[in-house]
Amino acid sequence: MTKKWWQNAVVYQVYPRSYQDSNGDGIGDLAGLTQRLPYIKRLGADVIWLNPIYKSPDKDNGYDISDYQSIQSAYGTMADFDHLLDSAHQQGLKLLMDLVVNHTSDQHDWFQQSRQSKDNPYADYYIWRDPVDGHEPNNWGSYFSGSAWTFEPKRNQYYLHLFAPGQPDLNWENPQVRQEVWNLMRFWLDKGVDGFRMDVINLISKPAGLPDAPQAPGAAYGDSQPIVSDGPKLNDYLREMNDEVLSHYDVMTVGEMPGSTPKDAITYTGLNANELNMVFQFEHVGLSPNPDARLGKWNAVPVKLTELKDSLSRWQTALDGKGWNSLYWNNHDQPRAVSRFGNDTPEFRERSAKMLATTLHMMQGTPYVYEGEELGMTNVHYTQLDQYEDLESLNAYHELVDDQHIVDQPTMLKYLSHISRDNARTPMHWDDTTNAGFTTGQPWFALNPNYPTINAADQLDQDDSVFNYYRRLIALRHSSDLIVLGSYEELDPKDDQVFAYKRHYQEQTLLVMSNFTDQTVTRDYGQAEASERLIGNYADDQGTTLRPYETKVYVFK
Ligand code: TEU
Ligand code: CA
């Protein structure tokens, strides 16, 4: 098999609102990102994934699009976009757009028309159902609390929204809807963008009859995810998308797929599947759900290392030679990696950030780095509800604390500080000046107060910084087929302190070992026989000794 460019690539994710403000309005923008391209280039990333920048009422920070072919004015103009794309290409960087087509904004013209009557040209663009006994058509809850259905008096019908009421789900059964999507994709591809990250793309095919979903005892609504994800026509839709659009361009695609299993992923990313290049799976970021199912993702329990190893290793083995993994610890929906899987205290933050990076970047797949991760940025550790912005967090708090009294206020605040999406959304730390160099104005969202000690300016020139460690990891991947293509072998799955694995390619073996604890431990995987220690997060090598959060990688030739 010949290697595809995206198999060799490392992707850097930019949440534009929080990256760099160029005009002092406190909101990051396209011109700001353009100024920062040399930074991304210096890190060594190949591709930028840009979160949505389209026109939007911003109920969900851009994931509610009201016009797919114009730029949100706070981010700039189409000319600013063209300039960004040009500059990126000139610097050898590719650009992925976020394609959000499971739903639109309720302010999109299609929905504005659709809601007027049952017989307008857009009437079937969305998923409308008659009331059942005067109620919602089924028990589905929204990801963002409340019912997944909202009543529209003009049609005397409910519309489906798996997310907020301002995010109505498109009706993919309607061929006209699919044509609209192919057209808007072509619009961006014809401009020269290098591919798409596809938002919740495994939710687009709803099961026939929209049956009730499993409902936890005492929960207000059913959990639609197992019912809606990987629906009956998903493969057909993705194949049609590929035939109609993607196959005509040399681009990269990654589908965001909550609930997908390795078996599902192989059907989408398989070498002859002609659907997508890779998926974002959710297993390893969903490993510690609350034991009380009514609380879902809201918890503050650290993930068990053995479960984490089991999950990531299963994906590594299952997709080897059959599909392709994407590798990530965090993104704009997840807490900061070092706070969640490592140790964000001053004593261990840098070591554990490098340890996590190594563990992930030595695996098979395409690694994603979320802005600030390369500096070891941490959760913001808010203590009050009014510090939060994210609608998922705010809605969940009101539903679970105020309305249903399932959990008390201090406990829910603890959960939010552990897992809220807002942990990842505080502005980027460029330097130690006011507002970390993010803006000269009033930032749209408060900065993490630790920016004077964690920032890019400080790290760029320090050889042993987290930034330069990531730079080295990325460079290693670019120079090694063993890292890109090698097969995976997990070592000691039951070891609950150390994550160790091997990679094999032709005559070579790579050995990776990472201590996930703050204790010194001893492990012997035969490293004394290695030809070389490729990289590690301590200057010296003490053989079988692994110091707190120590990680090291060896090659055997
Ligand atoms: O996220 C979809 C998703 O399944 C979750 O990660 C979701 O954000 C939530 O945390 C579930 O608990 C995508 C986008 O990445 C997210 O930002 C959007 O809010 C969402 O889709 C709707 O477009
Ligand atoms: Ca701005």
Image (tube, rainbow, N blue to C red):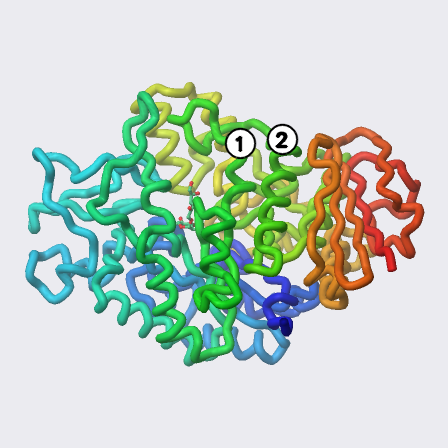
From the viewer's perspective, tell me whether residue 280 is left or right of residue 365.
left
**Whole-percent x and y of residue 533?**
87, 53
Whether pointer 1 and pointer 2 mark residues with C-beta atoms closer than 8 Å, the reply is yes
Q: CA distance from mark 1 to mark 2?
A: 8 Å
| Front-most of residues 167 and 173 | 173
Q: How many marks?
A: 2
Q: Is residue 255 visible?
A: yes
Residue that carries the numbered disc 1 in the rendered image: 288
**Whole-percent x and y of residue 555?**
84, 56
Please report the residue visible at 69 percent of the width from the left and 66 percent of the height from the top: 44
Q: Is residue 434 visible?
A: no
At numbered mark 2, what does the secondary structure look like: helix, strand or loop?
Answer: loop
Residue that carries the numbered disc 2 in the rendered image: 304
Which numbered dot is residue 384?
Answer: none
Q: Quadrant of the N terminus?
A: bottom right
Of pointers 1 and 2, the one earlier in the residue sequence: 1
**Whole-percent x and y of residue 328?**
59, 51
**Whole-percent x and y of residue 108?**
24, 61
Please report the residue visible at 66 percent of the width from the left and 34 percent of the height from the top: 305
Label 1, ligand 1: CB separation under 8 Å? no
* Amino acid at the residue labelled 1: Ser
How crowded is the residue under tag 2: few (<14 C-alpha within 10 Å), some, or many (20+)?
Answer: few
At numbered mark 1, what does the secondary structure look like: helix, strand or loop?
Answer: loop
From the viewer's perspective, tell me whether residue 251 is left or right of residue 183.
right
| Front-most of residues 506 and 35 | 506
User: In the displayed structure, would residue 553 be above or below residue 72?
Assistant: above
Q: Quadrant of the C terminus?
A: bottom right
From the viewer's perspective, tell me whether residue 115 is left or right of residue 60.
left
| Front-most of residues 278 and 434 | 278
* Amino acid at the residue labelled 2: Lys
Please report the residue visible at 68 percent of the width from the left and 62 percent of the height from the top: 485
Please report the residue visible at 46 percent of the width from the left and 73 percent of the height from the top: 81
